[in-house]
Amino acid sequence: QVQLVQSGAEVKKPGASVKVSCKASGYTFTSYGISWVRQAPGQGLEWMGWISAYNGNTNYAQKLQGRVTMTTDTSTSTAYMELRSLRSDDTAVYYCARGLNWGWYDYWGQGTLVTVSS
Amino acid sequence: SYVLTQPPSVSVAPGQTARITCGGNNIGSKSVHWYQQKPGQAPVLVVYDDSDRPSGIPERFSGSNSGNTATLTISRVEAGDEADYYCQVWDSSDAVFGGGTKLTVL
């Protein structure tokens, strides 16, 4: 069965960076992309970007350009999302989700809580 | 940027029909996907490409899309359907989510 398993919760100080992992199993990793979606406490879903696991092409949300980097490691079927220069309003649950570019997200990771606090 | 507008809340009695709307400029020209999210859980895809259901999603969940409004319809609502629902489209190169609708089962 398809599974996306994310790394554990993180606590970071403002200005620091965080890197969240998402390990995929149960399907051919390179046949799909991975998107990252975050959800601030009590708020809605915010799309952060997408990476093709086939060729590494990326598409980032404009508001995060320059602060976010998405990568994949096909040898371990793992996707990564790094967010730099963290601010308090980056505090959120970060989800990875499987999907094709221009498509829907049919499987989601369990979420990773990132707390940014001094 | 493209904006999707959802009502913050919808309430319905068990056994009745819930309709959750998602408004956007000429949204009928786009493919709309819907997600259900229960407290403390990751979202679950319930409808894709306007009206298709993933395997395992009950037939009670259906979708439509025309003009400036897409609609998720849940027939014969059950207590277990109480959740937040989000619509999603693609605009240019970005995915866009609606603000979400909290469905309350009375």
Image: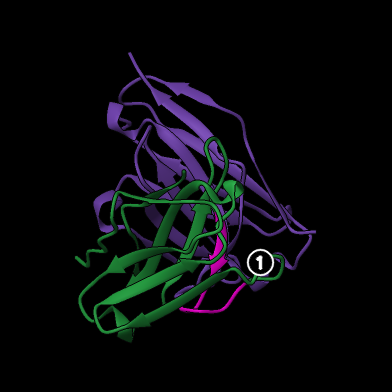
Which color is chain B depicted in? green
Q: Nearer the viewer, residue B62 or A55?
A: B62
Q: Which residues are magenta?
A: B44-53
Q: Residue furthest top?
A: A118
When asked about the image quadrant of residue B19, the answer is bottom left
Which color is chain A depicted in? purple
x, y (%) of residue A23?
68, 48
Look at the image and say whether residue A40 sits in the magenta stretch: no
x, y (%) of residue B102?
40, 47
- Quarter of the image for the N terminus of chain A: give it: bottom right
- The residue under label 1 is B58
Amino acid type indicated by mark 1: Pro
From the viewer's perspective, is residue B17 above or below residue A66?
Answer: below
From the viewer's perspective, is residue B60 above or below residue B101?
Answer: below
- Quarter of the image for the C terminus of chain A: give it: top left
x, y (%) of residue B82?
52, 46
Taken as a whole, is the magenta stretch helix, strand or loop?
loop
* Chain letter belonging to callout 1: B
Look at the image and say whether residue B47 sits in the magenta stretch: yes
